Amino acid sequence: MGQTNYIVAIELSSSKVTGAAGIETHNGIKIIATASTRADDFISKGIVRNVDKSSEAITNIINNLESKIIEEEGRDIMIKKAYVSLSGLTLRSMKSKVTRTYDSYTKITEEIINGLEDDNDMQFVVPDGYVKVKTITQEYKIDGKTDRAPIGTLAQAIEGHYLNIVIKKQFLDQLNESFRMADTEIADSFIAARMDADIILTKDDRRNGCALVNIGADTTTVAIYNNDSLRKLAVLPLGSRNITRDLCSEQISYDQAEAIKISRGYKSTVKETEPIDNDTVNDIIGGRMCEILKNVKFQIEESEELIGKITFTGGGSRLKNFELLIEEYLPEFRTAIACDPQLAFECLPGVNTIGVFTTALYGLMNHGKDNCCEYIEPAPISNGGALFGEEEMNGQEQEIEKPVEKHEEKKPEETKKNSGKKSGSKNKSWGFGTLFGGFKETVEGIIKTATSEDPEEHDRDNDE
């Protein structure tokens, strides 16, 4: 059986942990297993708060995927590593610039470009408590003019412009520890917002200027693109769960509040009065979404990028009549709500993707390259020592039969000493031949003893 390349991806969000496994085929990736579990009580605002519960959830996802793969493949298999998305409240972007000047016109080479990146790594100051997880090259300026492909150009000065993605070290460590406790290696990690953009935004969207806004349960992520490059990444501590909590202030349970948010949405035309009337629901939803959308607008304006379009995704954008909210609070922008992505992957019949396969998970599967699984070869079955040895089965005996010698009684000390020795490796096992050989020697000994002269009579003859 040939080696199959398995791609495994896991996404940890504020509401759930999802996983998927696929195999590489000549047509792309074929999804063969998915799994999902709730994450409300151990992940908050995209940050792992409880490593024990997080590792348990990851282990459950891995075990679930493994069992489905084994069922499909018919062979024992173990998931050793997975591709993971990075998100959460502490994820953000920071710009930097590196400049080199020359006394005369100098041809820009790949070595110079690599040197600028190395200079950025050394010169960029990471905020206290944070670590840099990604550096994205935005553009170069050759003698003050923008050039995205400067190699081969003559210049006296070159500037490299970079976007550095940082995350709080504590929370990255907690994510890594969760996977370590689950005995699963992180094959590679990718920014969730970039995975979303790869699936949702078109090339024209990224080139002409677009903001991708993912309204999740606890956070809202704003990713701004222009000139086909990520220009800004910000995560707001606001999400659709804030609406549910606001509804709870009307003295109803969390489950009731969540059901009202989903069933009625904004400006419901169905007349409802219990347990809360529609006017109150509209005021709460409108007030909270106004806060979120105004913060999105602020992030766009602060980036100073020319944005032609805002595309919304995430659970919050599925709110009923959400389009009325963006028309009301963002009238100056052209907006769109991303539909669930059409799964371009081939999918094994019966595999569930509804509510499991997020855009970030989809993107992770696209970026995965390394085989994440290995087969478990069954242990060889030991015969435990055969009753009949090969020589005995062939009727052959290894030992040469010795003549019977006169029996001498051993002294107690010698008997005790010999009884403590272990049989050597060369001793023959107790097969049928050995047992029969011993029996043969015993019979011959009895016959010889019976036919020999009486020792006492022999002694009397000698005395006479």
Image: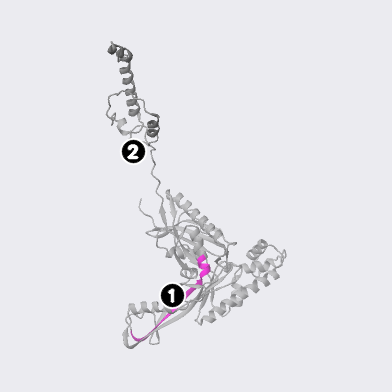
Q: Is residue 421 above or below residue 285?
A: above
Q: CA distance from mark 2 to mark 1?
A: 67 Å
**From where the camera sits, is residue 267 visible?**
yes
Q: Residue at x 49, y 53 (%)?
A: 63
Q: Disc 1 marks which residue?
A: 136
Residue span colored magenta = 154-173
Give the secondary structure at mark 1.
strand
Q: Disc 2 marks which residue?
A: 425
Residue 351: percent from left, percent from top: 49, 55
Give the secondary structure at mark 2.
loop
Residue 32: percent from left, percent from top: 45, 55
Q: Main secondary structure of the magenta part?
A: strand
Three-letter amino acid code at the position of disc 1: Ile
Instruction: Tell me whether circle 2 and circle 1 mark residues in contact (CB < 8 Å).
Output: no
Three-letter amino acid code at the position of disc 2: Ser
Of all residues, the one furthest to the bottom in this rendering is 103
The answer to if 156 sits in the magenta stretch is yes
